[in-house]
Image: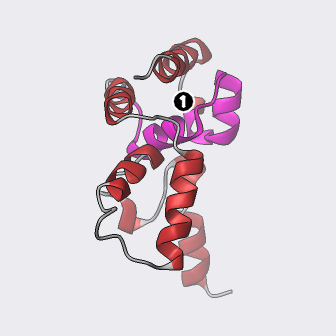
Amino acid sequence: MSSRRRNQIEEEDAATLKLGTEFNNAGCLLISEVKFLLDLRTKDAPDTTVYKKTMEYVKTFSKFSSNDSTASVREALGREGNLAQFEIAQIANLCPSTAEEAKNIIPSLVKLEDDHLQAILDEVQTLRKFQT
């Protein structure tokens, strides 16, 4: 393996939030946000397999049923100044119920104390439970 390729592999590591230079200033959409954006295109939606499979995916895995509840979750997670965009999206998309589960599926969250992370997750679960 070339040293250039090896350096590239070492640089990209989601566990440490090293996602590659193309993602340094990129925002992350929640699956629910993608669903709402695609729903806006229903009239002029392309009739392609990729589009249909994407719609099927976002309908299956969207955790929030309204634009308001999605915005509330994004706002709540955004108030946590120590969460990266990637972590916000992962928490909202995966909705882990415990701090242990969250840290296992989103390793970069080890920086947070379990009690604090659990409070964040509980708020997301509450918003999900009482969404309109």
Q: Is residue 13 visible?
A: no
Rendered position, 23 above or below 123: below
Give the quadrant of the C terminus: top left
* Residue 95 is inside the magenta segment: yes
Nearest to the observer: residue 19 or residue 62: 62
Q: Is residue 42 left or right of residue 129?
A: left
Rendered position, 35 above or below 7: above
Which region shows up in magenta?
82-109
Residue 85 x/y as whole percent: 39, 44
Q: Is residue 48 left or right of residue 40?
A: right
| Number of residues whose C-alpha sits closer than 10 Å to that of mark 1, classed few (under 14), some (14–19) or many (20 or more) | few
Nearest to the observer: residue 105 or residue 19: 105
Residue 81 x/y as whole percent: 33, 28
The structure residue drawn at horizontal position 63% and vertical position 31%, both measured from the top left corner, is: 102
Residue 38 x/y as whole percent: 36, 58
The structure residue drawn at horizontal position 49% and vertical position 56%, both measured from the top left corner, is: 18
Residue under label 1, please give it. 111
Q: Give the main secondary structure, helix, strand or loop, of the magenta stretch.
A: helix
Nearest to the observer: residue 46 or residue 102: 46
Rendered position, 115 above or below 26: above
